[in-house]
Amino acid sequence: MNIENKREREKLIVSQMIVLYCIKNHGGKTLCAECRELTEYACQRSDKCPFMENKTFCSNCRVHCYKPEMREKIRAVMRFSGPRMMFHHPITAMRHVIEVKREKKRQEKEMHNET
């Protein structure tokens, strides 16, 4: 998969998670201003990520480029939406789980080889 496709998939997943979070927690049918800002911020971070070629998702990255305030917001979204994604976007959720596990295994192997 090329880097641009990875970026777009990451942006799609985070956008879906923010929409789910916003609808369930802020009660609207569309994104509120705060969640729209978070979506734009997350997409900008993905667009500028220099590690995209070697990582799967931000949660697996060794460098966290989010500002502290935004990092806390995205963590709240992930904690809430992560478990619910299976019911709203099952294929995306399964693909995400598989890729995260694969990446963690790769990182463990890489760290083991360094020692």
Image (cartoon, rainbow, N blue to C red):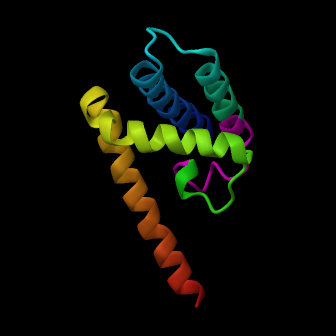
Where residue 87 sits: x, y (%)?
24, 31
101 or 53: nearer the viewer: 101
User: How far across and down, in percent of the image, does residue 86 sit?
Assistant: 27, 36
**Is residue 75 shown above or below 55?**
above
Q: Quadrant of residue 91?
A: top left
Q: Residue at x 69, y 59 (%)?
A: 63
**Residue at screen point 59% across, 36% down:** 7
Residue 56 magenta-highlighted: yes
Q: Is residue 29 magenta?
A: no
Horizontal side, residue 3 vs residue 109: left or right: right
Residue furthest bottom as drawn: 115
Secondary structure mostly seen in the magenta stretch = loop
Name the spot of residue 17 as percent of width and height, x first: 45, 31
In the figure, is residue 64 to the left or right of 76?
A: right
Q: Quadrant of the C terminus?
A: bottom right
User: Which residue is outermost to the front?
Assistant: 26
The magenta segment = 45-57
Of the pair 24 and 56, the residue shown nearer to us: 24
Identify which residue is drawn at 54% across, 57% down.
Answer: 60
How many numbered marks does the figure carry? 0
- Residue located at (51% from left, 70% from top): 107
**Residue 52 against residue 24 in the figure, above or below:** below
Q: Quadrant of residue 75?
A: top right
Horizontal arrangement in the rendering, residue 35 relative to residue 28 (left or right): right
From the top left corner, tell me how far across and down residue 8 is, in percent.
56, 31
